[in-house]
Amino acid sequence: MESSLTVKFRGAEAELLDRLVRSGLFATKSEALRASLVKYGADLGLLRPRDLWAALDAQPRRRVSAAKLREQVRKAEDAD
């Protein structure tokens, strides 16, 4: 199944989305939104952890060193 849509964000939501991408945690706004939707579905209990892990295992991995990840998280925290 595939779905596409256009969404406009303003205010705090738009700023948060920009920060997620600027920090380097996500390559694109679309990627950040996809991850957020999965997280929300998991939080609501609509997605089981084992199904999430199976889906993640099927995806190509983005190689990020521990040092680079710490740097990206620090940038996200400092963007406040």
Image (cartoon, grey):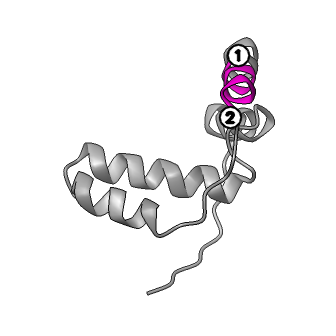
Of circles 2 and 1, the one toward us is 1
Report if the CB atoms under discs 2 and 1 are less than 8 Å apart: no
Q: Which residue is mark 2?
A: 11
Q: Position of residue 4 (x, y in %)?
A: 58, 78
- Neighbours of disc 1 within 10 Å: few (<14), some (14-19), many (20+): few
Left or right placement of residue 58 versus residue 47 in this view: right
Q: Position of residue 49 (x, y in %)?
A: 25, 52
Q: Is residue 71 magenta?
A: yes
| Magenta highlight range | 65-73
Q: Is residue 17 magenta?
A: no
**Three-letter code for the amino acid on which mark 1 is drawn:** Arg
Seen at 44% across and 62% down, the residue is 57
Q: Main secondary structure of the magenta part?
A: helix
| Residue 38 position (above or below residue 58) | above
Quadrant location, the C terminus: top right
| Residue 72 position (above or below residue 30) | above
